[in-house]
Image (spheres, coloured by chain):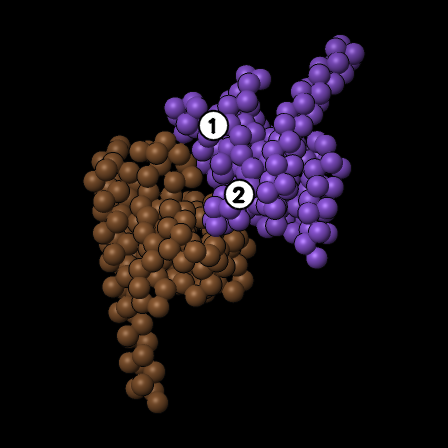
Chain colours: A purple, B brown
Amino acid sequence: MRIYNFEDTTAEVNTDEMFMREALRLAQKAFEEDEVPIGAIIVAQNKIIGRGYNLTERLNDVTAHAEMQAFTAAANFLGGKYLKDCTLYVTVEPCVMCAGASYWTQVSRIVYGAKDEKRGYTTVAPHAMHPKTQIFGGILEEECGALMRSFFRAKR
Amino acid sequence: MRIYNFEDTTAEVNTDEMFMREALRLAQKAFEEDEVPIGAIIVAQNKIIGRGYNLTERLNDVTAHAEMQAFTAAANFLGGKYLKDCTLYVTVEPCVMCAGASYWTQVSRIVYGAKDEKRGYTTVAPHAMHPKTQIFGGILEEECGALMRSFFRAKR
């Protein structure tokens, strides 16, 4: 039983890493477009149904975060506005706005990479998420964080 | 001096009521389209530069709140993504998502109508707003709240 659980957990971690790599690829795209490098995808039944990366500069719109675009894309794909059986993968811990949006989508699960100590929802608004949403941080944390650090280092 | 201040305050309240009436007109539009009846406008130098009303049903998108659309419209109008010298008028207290978006816009002032005891940001995430944003609630509270109550009564 113990081994079974262990294998099961490993499989899930690998799937999470695989999907987080896709979110990272989108974050890299943001980086190349001189946007704060954050990427996000929505997964349902192991299929990617929504993608987004930060476009606040290009769209001249502070609401154009990676998660917001991924939510809208996934809802369009599903033809329904709730994401109850979906997972959001995002390279950086969601901000308050995106946590508040997650609440409305009722997304089942959120997996994020690097922590955002300053503007992450856990610091500013720890009760922002839906109580039924399961949240896991730290997947590919080092890579997700390194991309952010390298972006802001270049800006200084 | 006292009289001058008094007159000044009255004038501001009247301006706030005037703009809130426009937000209410948009909320009424939402009501007629069978959307949760919330309306919002952004005002800069006494001019309306952005409008929005709740379209979550029509757009099939939980992020399509009145405030989010007004923010995007105002940023488009200004050609800049910050709303530092602007006021947001919204018929109902912003939710956590919209409060988080307000933070990013750095909007100077928020005037809302009715309180949202359940999902308003003051209940769920009191630190979500930008510390420099001045916030006033209760303008045309009765009318803004009555529209909401009448919508949800009809839904039951």
Residue kind at label 1, given as amino acid type: Ala
Question: Where B68 sits versus A129, above or below?
Answer: below
Helix, strand or loop status at disc 2: loop
Using a 10 Å C-alpha cutoff, classify the residue at mark 1 as few (fewer than 14 neighbours), some (14 to 19) or many (20 or more).
Answer: many
Q: Residues within 10 Å of mark 2 (few under 14, many from 20)?
A: many
Mark 2 — residue?
Answer: A55
At which x and y percent is residue B73? 37, 50
Q: Closer to the camera, B43 or B25? A: B43
Q: Which mark is residue A47?
A: none
Residue indicated by mark 1: A74
Residue occupying the point 33% across, 42% down? B54
Mark 2 or 1, which is nearer the eye? Answer: 2
Q: Chain of mark 2?
A: A
Give the quadrant of residue B23. bottom left
Task: Residue A10: tell me if it is visible.
Answer: yes
- Tell me which amino acid carries mark 2: Leu
